[in-house]
Amino acid sequence: MGISNLNRSLWVFHVNTGSCNGCDIEIVAALMPRYDIERFGMKLVGSPRHADVLLVTGPVTMDMSAKLKRVYEQTPDPKVVIAVGNCGATGGVFYESYCLDGPIDNIIPVDVYVRGCPPRPEAIINGVVKAWAKLEKKEAGK
Amino acid sequence: MRLSRDKNSFKISVGPVHPALKEPIQLNCLIAGEKIKSVDFELSQAHRGIEWIATRRNPIQILYLAERICGICNICHTISFCTAVEKIAGIEVPARAQYVRTMGAELERIHSHLLWAGVAAHELGFDSAMHYTWKAREKVLDVIELLSGNRITKGIPTIGGVRRDFEEKNHAKIIEAVEYYRSVFGKLKAIFLDDPVIKSRTKDIGVLTKKDALTLCAVGPTARASGIARDVRQDEPYAAYPDFGLKAITPDQLTGEIKGDVFDRIVVRLLEVAQSADILEFCVKNMPGGKIVYEEKPIKLLAQLKGVHGEATGRLEAPRGEVFHYVKLVGEESPYSWKVKPPTYSNLLPWIPMLEGEQVADIPIIAASIDPCMSCCNRAVVAENNENVLNHDMLHRLSVEKTENIRGQLA
């Protein structure tokens, strides 16, 4: 993975689509002093229009699927989507529920899957590194 | 409830996807100038149909489902469900397992309250305080990881006991964490309770009177901050709490007065962190020996549960307040019914008196002050059959129909 010539830090927007909070608090933990991915310039931003990366958690409930799609469309290209957690990738323990539109890749294209219930902050950071490499490729091909 | 607008007021919607909210919920506020006139909220964004899924799974499988109702207070939901099933089947939990459950719950309370303190600091704009509390929180996560193998979800309780023992060789680490939290307590207190800016942002803000708290059935730290000394651990002690003899914490124990504002809610939660440290120490010192589970083989346990009929409730004090589970077994593999009443469900209505009359800039900290947990709370979706409400799909369909009509007319 060559991480070399992206001329900006990654800004991340976090969308919770009905997750249990487990992944969400691990995402915040990754930003906090122990793991501190802010030292690489990554930070959570307040609007998808400022973001390079979408961190999506949760199995996508019916209520949230249209909103997730809108957030995705508001994010400028090139962008990468990281699905954090098992339920975002497959539905997890909720797979058979009547009120899910998910998993996430039913609604929007996903670039990186971070598995775990919830994944450790190290795994999330690893996912972001993979996403960074993908973003570089997308940026080069633009 | 619909907000009615007039000429001088303006409606702002916060959420469901909003940077001040970590979870999807929509707050609709009617404002006049900077003042909030009335508040309404829309739920159901995080509804995952958990109770329905449970009617297709066996009780052992439901343990893992119950754990994923909420990632933060996961052990409380599992213990609550187990208690209900144990009551129906007449299973007695070994004393050592009760202590393990208590310690799991208290470790979780420390992690949840520190997490909340960090989020509250962030909402106020004190990111350095947030970093400090979350750094302090990593200590308890390390202990949880050592004891259960995972940082967040624990998989500790099972029906009739616990799956994994908190062995004596690990007790030194628990005591180390207890000592650590006692040592940082002074600093946390200085950050949150003595800082003049935090004081002025939280004192007399988001007041919930004792009367309102009682009328709206507030629970947990939200109710205790308004002066209602109600705590399931004190009123109906379960697990190891009867031995400890817990007393509910109210803010006057530190400040000498009860106002029911955001500041008081911070006081209650910080004092509860210290109380949890005491309980952990007590449990480590007094842990009895013996079995940790009533029946080690899940298959045998399931066979026994298949034969029982009845209904029961399990309740306990989660970090946010009282968790209440209702289970009905009818002699089949899956339960006939399972109902969950989480603390946030009771604590949402108090939002309305708290927010009314406050400023728009206070919405984040007041909303965060009850420690809301939407994933716990969203137990139902309301399919409103109201023709006045047009969602995106319906509008699009109407628009397409009109185009088709016009095309037909012009052709």
Image (spheres, helix red, strand yellow):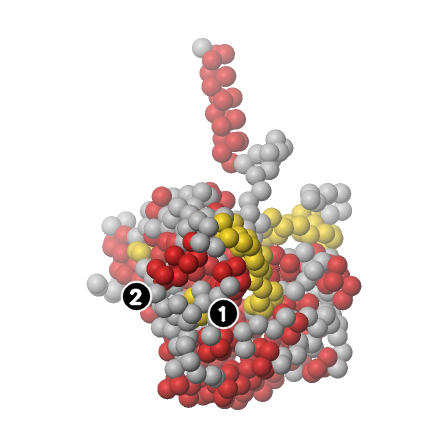
Q: Is residue B273 visible?
A: no
The image position of residue A81, as x and y in percent, is 35, 53
Q: Is residue B175 visible?
A: yes
Q: Would residue B34 be found to the left or right of residue B277 on screen? A: right
The image position of residue A59, as x and y in percent, is 41, 51
Residue B385 position by quadrant: top right
Along the viewing direction, whichever of A135 and A33 lies nearer the viewer: A33
Chain containing the residue with disc 1 = B
The crowd level at tag 1 (other Cα within 10 Å; few <14, some 14-19, many 20+) is some
Q: In the rendered view, would you say B183 is above or below B332?
A: below
Q: In the rendered view, would you say B64 is above or below B124?
A: above
Same chain check for tags 1 and 2: no
The amino acid marked with disc number 2 is Asn
- SS under mark 2: helix
Residue B301 position by quadrant: bottom left
Residue denoted by label 1: B92
Q: Residue at x 50, y 17 (%)?
A: B405
The amino acid marked with disc number 1 is Glu
Location of the N terminus of chain A by quadrant is bottom left
Q: Residue at x 37, y 54 (%)?
A: A92
Residue denoted by label 2: A126
Q: Residue at x 58, y 77 (%)?
A: B241
Q: In the rendered view, would you say B399 is above or below B382?
A: above
Residue B154 position by quadrant: bottom left
The crowd level at tag 2 (other Cα within 10 Å; few <14, some 14-19, many 20+) is few
Along the viewing direction, whichever of A89 and B275 lies nearer the viewer: B275
Along the viewing direction, whichever of B121 and A51 lies nearer the viewer: B121
